[in-house]
Image (cartoon, rainbow, N blue to C red):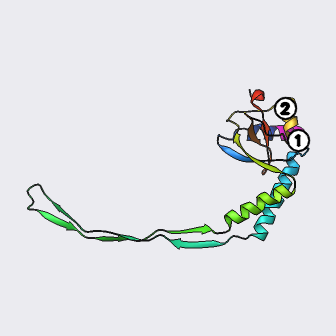
Amino acid sequence: MSRLAASLALLLALSACGPGTTTYAYRADTAPAQADRDIFQCQVEATRNIPVNTQVRQRPGYWIPARRYCDRDGKNCYIEPSEWVPGEVYSFDANADLRQEYFQRCLAGRGYSLATVDRCPSGTTAQGPLAQALLARLRPVRAGACAITITDYSSNLIYAEERG
């Protein structure tokens, strides 16, 4: 199977991504493969320079007070004892927002602009010249466009009038 045919098959298989939004990185005259390398390098750089800082916290606990239950006549009663409910323990990365900002600035420094776009609906396909165009160059954001995954880290856009 030729490299182009394999790439087109992969492109068609990946077009089944579901709805929602994704962040699209665009730079004029850039191939998705180059964008993939740049995005990956910026992620590595951001992780290297802003490491994970895991913080562990505990939400406050609370008491459930004792309760008295009686039958309709009020003669047969019992008391359910009070109960202590400990607070939930959770963790978070205190550097996540800073690392994301570093990543975005890294891409901007390489000439990319970022936009939030809709993912293409399941079943959206690209064939022939359109599929080749999606592999060749990133496309500028346009109203009604949706993103289709091209590589591990890169997407490209299919315009509304091109969807079948």
Q: Name which quarter of the figure residue 146 lies in.
A: top right
Query: Element type at marker 2?
Result: helix
Percent position (x, y) of residue 99?
73, 64
Percent position (x, y) of residue 69?
18, 61
Q: Is residue 47 above or below residue 158?
A: below
* Residue 7 lies in the magenta stretch: yes
Percent position (x, y) of residue 100?
72, 60
Q: Amino acid at mark 2?
A: Leu
> Mark 2 or mark 1, which is nearer the start of the sequence?
2
* Residue 112 lies in the magenta stretch: no
Task: State the predominant SS element of the stretch in magenta.
Answer: helix
Which residue, given by chain and number where applicable, does mark 2 sit on? 130
Which residue, given by chain and number where applicable, does mark 1 sit on? 137
Percent position (x, y) of residue 44?
80, 64
Residue stretch rendered in magenta on the structure: 1-8
Decide if residue 31 is in sight here: yes
Give the distance between the C-alpha atoms of the residues marked 1 and 2, in whole angstroms: 11 Å
Tell me the crowding category of disc 2: few under 14, some 14 to 19, or many 20 or more residues within 10 angstroms, Cα based.
few
Q: Is residue 26 above or below residue 62?
A: above
